[in-house]
Structures are given as structure tokens and as C-alpha cells.
Image (cartoon, coloured by chain):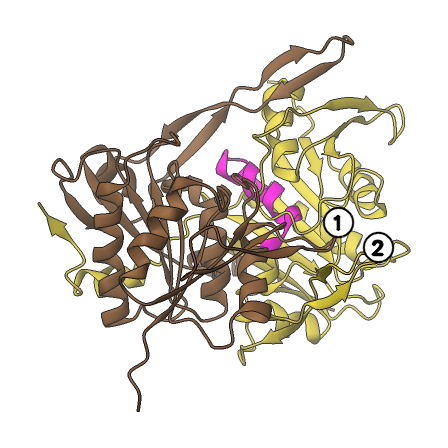
Chain colours: A yellow, B brown
């Protein structure tokens, strides 16, 4: 049997021209054949949205040079992965990576994350999948430490394979490679955003609202992603898409919630 | 101390004019004071999207008559809940209900569901929260059986209170109240969508794609929401927003994924 190079699908939510996806494509090219299907415009905060009310467009682009097959798509990150699997790739990818996101997707941010929704979409389909995020919103962010973490984590995933129905949420602190303390497997911290909408009045005297908020870490554990990131480590959280609160089933059964007619 | 009527916040993802939210408002009015904050247009498939790239609009509407405070909002279901908590309500609601969705949010559909994202948003903020969905996409759907299930589940939740950081995903089969077999506490079935994009060519010879797909139930258990719904029961799945695959942490620790620099 021929020893085929791994096929690696790359997507993101900041859009195909974001520096983060370029850094990820560069790091992935060392591991195998890279194909990119990414949004043609920024999609941050899109959660796990899919596009059902309008058709999708997808166009080939040579944005990453002649050796990388790349497509920009009018849809969400989840749409991109669906399109890639159905219309672009002629074999199953060995790995799906999403990012590198400009900004954190740690703790509760995983819920709102387009970056992670691309990875979740792949994992639902049975792929090895990882989302990467750097805690730096700047378009001039330095991805040196992030690329180091990407190489380390991708190497381990290709070597060992993830447990079934599990993907990884990897966040990297804003730090130089020299100051990075290490890499830690963590759980998702308990945290939330407290909203503070910024209420304004438009020139026509109508009110409008900008969503802003304050992040509140509710967790005192030292095994969380927030703890790791605050202490200079990259965090690796295994993520699942079975949302059942299994421990609550017994409690609900005691409520006489069940009925037989 | 005065015995205050429960304050109930209602939202959805099909938009404020959908028959499903009207049925939910009617059922909730029997339990307490109802306030509605819902999207001004359909938002299905929006997952847990939030709006950060543009401002939000919110307008009062008397759509539900003079006794129900109601607002239509330009954002997603999650935006609606955030706005309601920060800008509309002057006390914490005793319950948040979302729906009744026109179409299933069982099994893996929970991931793509705007209906459930409204409920999740409330639960993250510590509210009692329930999403309701009827397995009937029609705008002429009969909500009689659904309203019966809503009343039963809401009564139990107000009586017992949900376990911390848990909400409910309730799905109701398309059936008459007489033929409804009962109500069952379940786990989320293992399932996925297999994409089949419908590729077309526009009048200008450019390709476009409609997202379609085939639902595949991968689960043979009789304790799942899919089993319950197929067998004529309403399903009640307790849902959590800690996405950590806790069982995988030990496995990853054995990979030497952790590093100390």
C-alpha cells in the first residue's frame, strides 16, 4: 500500500484573508496535503449557524499560492466544512483544523465560536478535528508561539487519534514562544458574559444597541482552560457534541415528569 | 411577603409572527406574567450566533394584545435573550421558554438550533430555561398536543427547579393530543446529517448550492429522544453547556500532550 500524505482540511471564521488562517496553512503544509475552504468574509460570533434560507457560493482562489487548493465560500464556518466534504474533497480528510482564531475561544466562548463550529461539524461527521485560537484580536498578532503549539498538538493527534466523538479546543496565550510556560490538558472553565448593551440614538432619533459585555470567570479550579491561559500555558480541552446532562436524567425521573397516556 | 406571579420570558427563532410562539405565549399566560422578546424575522439554523458586527434594533409591539409586553428585535435568538435581560426586564425572570419551534430540535439538531440557543443563553445566566419544538414545519401546525406537553413540563420545572447549569430540550411528535403516547425523559440520540448539496447554475452561468441533507440516526438505544419521538412520545432531554469531554481528559494525559517549558 502506498504511503499517502495526510489530507488536511483547513477552515476558520475570521475569513480566508485573516493572518491566522495563513499561519495555520503554513504549519499544516509540513504535515501533508492542505485544502482550504473558508468564509469569504468574517463570521465571528456565528456559533454553529448553517445557511438554509439562501444559496451558497463557492469560488476557487489562488490566495495561498499555486500549491494549495483553496476556496472561499459565502457561508458560515459550518457551511464551509459541509461544502468541503460534499463538493470539494474526493477522499476523506485525515484531519480538520480550524483557525487560528484572532481572539479567545476558551471556557463559555466555545458556545459562540464559529472557529469551533467548523471543528464540531467535522467531528460530527467522524473526522479528527481541532480548533485553534490565539488570545490576540490584532490583525498584526505574532503567531510564532501559536504555530509551535499547533505543530505539537497536530503531531500528537495524527499519532494517537482522538477518542470517538471528541475534538479539541486549543487556546494559546498572547506570549512569545520563549515565555510560553507549556501546554496543558484542561476542562472548560465555568464562566459567563455579563451583558452591558451600549444604547445609542441614531440621527433619526431611533435607539440602537451595541452588544458589549464583561467576562466573568466563576471557576476557582486550577484544572481549567482559564487558569492555564492566565498562567502562561496553552490550553487543550477535549470537547463533545453530546449535550445531554446525563447526571440530571435520574433527578428528572424522580419528578414524575414521565407520563404514559 | 407578597406572592408574586412568576415572570416568564418568551423567545423563539421562527420570528415573532410565527404561530408557535403565539401558542407558547397562550400556554404561559396561565402560569404568570409574560414578556416576549423575539426576532423580527426567521432565524432558523442560526445556532448560538450573536451579533457583534452591527448594532441591534428593538421595537415594542402590541402583536400579542394589550396585556402582553412584547418586543421584536433585529438580532438572533441569543441576542434577544441578552437584550431582554439587560434592557427590557426590571427583575430576573423565573423562567425562560423558547419556541414552540416549527420543526425538530432533537438529537444532533440541538447544535444548529436557534430555539435552543435562546434557552442555553438564559441557562448560562442562571435562569430556569426550556426549549420546545414540534415536529411539524407547517405554519398551519396543530399545537394542541404541544401545549399540553408545555403545561406539564413547565408545571414540573416551576415546582422542582432544574439542577444547576441544566436546561431542557423538549420535542413533541406530530400527533393529536389523544394519540400522544406520553412524555419521556431521554438522552440525545447519536445522529448526524449527511449533506447532499443541490448544485445549480444561475442565469449568469455561475454555480450556487442549496444545503440539503439526509438525517441518519446512528443510535439503537431505546432511551433516546429519537426513539421516544418515533414511538409517539414527547422527549425531554436535560442539556448542559459544559462541552468538556471529561472522560477524554485521562486519555489525552497519557499522550504526553502536556508540556512544561
Rendered-image quadrant of the N terminus of chain A: top right
Residue bearing mark 1? A100
Q: Position of residue B59 (x, y in %)?
A: 61, 56
User: Mark 1 vs mark 2: same chain?
Assistant: yes
Q: Is residue B59 visible?
A: yes
Residue at screen point 68% across, 68% down: A197
The residue that appears at 50% across and 42% down in the rendered structure is B112
- Which one is in front, A195 or A16? A195
Q: Residue A125 magenta-drawn?
A: yes
Disc 2 secondary structure class = loop
Picture coordinates of residue A208 (x, y %)? 72, 59
The crowd level at tag 1 (other Cα within 10 Å; few <14, some 14-19, many 20+) is: many
Q: Residue furthest front?
A: B66
Q: Nearer the viewer, residue B97 or A243?
A: B97
Q: x, y (%) of residue B142?
A: 28, 35
Residue A143 is labelled as: 2
**Residue at the left extreme of this rendering:** A261
* SS at circle 1: strand
Q: Would residue B239 be found to the left or right of residue A13 on screen?
A: left
- For mark 2, does the 10 Å Cα neighbourhood hold few (<14), some (14 to 19), or many (20 or more) residues? many
Amino acid at each position: 500500500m502506498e504511503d499517502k500524505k495526510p489530507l488536511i482540511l483547513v477552515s476558520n471564521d475570521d475569513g480566508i484573508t485573516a493572518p491566522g488562517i495563513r499561519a495555520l496553512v503554513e504549519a499544516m503544509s509540513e504535515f501533508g496535503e492542505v485544502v482550504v475552504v473558508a468564509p469569504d468574509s468574517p463570521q465571528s460570533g456565528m456559533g454553529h449557524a448553517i445557511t438554509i434560507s439562501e444559496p451558497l457560493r463557492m469560488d476557487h482562489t489562488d490566495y495561498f499560492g499555486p500549491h494549495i487548493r483553496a476556496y472561499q465560500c459565502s457561508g458560515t464556518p459550518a457551511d464551509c466544512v459541509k461544502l468541503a466534504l460534499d463538493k470539494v474533497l474526493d477522499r476523506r480528510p485525515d484531519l480538520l483544523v480550524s483557525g487560528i482564531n484572532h481572539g479567545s475561544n476558551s471556557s463559555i466562548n466555545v458556545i459562540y465560536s464559529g472557529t469551533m463550529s467548523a471543528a464540531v461539524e467535522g467531528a460530527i461527521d467522524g473526522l479528527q478535528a481541532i480548533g485553534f485560537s490565539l488570545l490576540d484580536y490584532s490583525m498584526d498578532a505574532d503567531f510564532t508561539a501559536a504555530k509551535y503549539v499547533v505543530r505539537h498538538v497536530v503531531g500528537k493527534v495524527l499519532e494517537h487519534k482522538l477518542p470517538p466523538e471528541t475534538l479539541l479546543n486549543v487556546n494559546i496565550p498572547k506570549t512569545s514562544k520563549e515565555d510560553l510556560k507549556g501546554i496543558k490538558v484542561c476542562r472548560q472553565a465555568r464562566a459567563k458574559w455579563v451583558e452591558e448593551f451600549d444604547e445609542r440614538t441614531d440621527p433619526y432619533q431611533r435607539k440602537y444597541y451595541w452588544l458589549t459585555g464583561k467576562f466573568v470567570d466563576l471557576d476557582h479550579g486550577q484544572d481549567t482552560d482559564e487558569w492555564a491561559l492566565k498562567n502562561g500555558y496553552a490550553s487543550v480541552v477535549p470537547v463533545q457534541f453530546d449535550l445531554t446532562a446525563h447526571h440530571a436524567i435520574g433527578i428528572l425521573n424522580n419528578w414524575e415528569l414521565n407520563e404514559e397516556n
